[in-house]
Image (cartoon, rainbow, N blue to C red):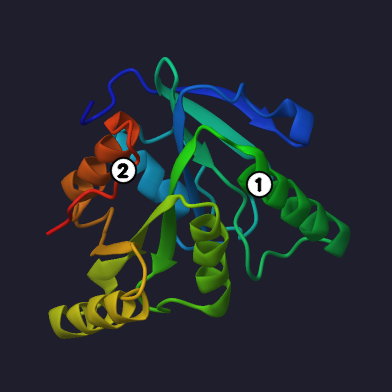
Amino acid sequence: MSTYPNVKFLTSAAEAHQLAPDVGREIAFAGRSNSGKSTAINAITQRSGLARVSRTPGRTQLINFFELVPERRLVDLPGYGFAKVPERVRLHWLQLMEHYFNVRESLVGLVLIVDSRRGLGAQDAGMLEWVLARDRLAHVLLTKSDKLNQRDAQRVLRETKAACADTSVTVQLFSALAKQGFEEARRVMDGWLNDTQKKAPVVT
């Protein structure tokens, strides 16, 4: 599948009943608001306008489904954190995402987007616990790594791996600007989408 040449927007969901049919296999992308989630999706799929990129935190207010090939999907979840949205909207997002994680049988793994300059936060750790509790896989993309020097980037990578050491979570550095980590991320995703046993791929 590699570069996903046939990726296309499938549907958006603001309510639970609007979710795409729960068939096949899908990978969810989640992260704090403004962590670079949409940019990462666009970089990995090599489609610059696929996921909407905004400088305004909280712009992704829907669960967006993208089809890679029939019955293989990427799912862009609403950002969490310091999005400037009304509390009622924030609560609705939380309820919708909780429903999504609790019911989706086609979900095989979560790609968690973490700004490498911030590191793994409490909400990020909570998101990992959420998906691991459902016996799903997880992979952390430490985005915007080009903003760090090599020493600091490696330090953040070590610290994040250490924080996830007791789990099956894998971690990598990623930079859309420097075009770093694209192939590694795709290898992980391809392993999840094609492995019927849902075993964690080996990442070096």
Q: Which quadrant holds residue 199?
A: top left
Q: Quadrant of residue 12?
A: top right
Q: Amino acid at mark 2?
A: Ala
- Name the secondary structure under disc 1: helix
Residue at screen point 51% across, 72% down: 125
The N terminus: image quadrant: top left
Image coordinates of residue 181 in percent, x first then y, are 20, 54
Q: Residue furthest top?
A: 70
Amino acid type, residue under disc 1 in the picture = Asn
Residue 32 seen by the camera:
no
Residue underneath mark 1: 102
**Residue 174 numbered tag:** none
Q: CA distance from mark 1 to mark 2?
A: 29 Å
The residue tagged with tag 2: helix, strand or loop? helix
Query: For mark 2, what is the residue?
Result: 43
- Could you tell me residue 26's position as x and y percent? 46, 33
Image coordinates of residue 21 in percent, x first then y, are: 61, 21
- The answer to whether 71 is drawn above or below residue 203 in the figure is above
The local crowd at label 1, few if under 14, some if 14 to 19, many if 20 or more residues have their Cα within 10 Å, is some
- Asked if residue 145 lies left or right of residue 87, the reply is left
Q: Is residue 162 left or right of residue 17?
A: left
* Residue at x-position 36% and y-position 68%: 167
State the residue lying farthest toward the right: 88
The location of residue 132, given as percent across then percent down, is 49, 59
For residue 179, above or below residue 8: below
Badge 1 or badge 2: first in the primary sequence: 2
* Nearer to me, 189 or 39: 189
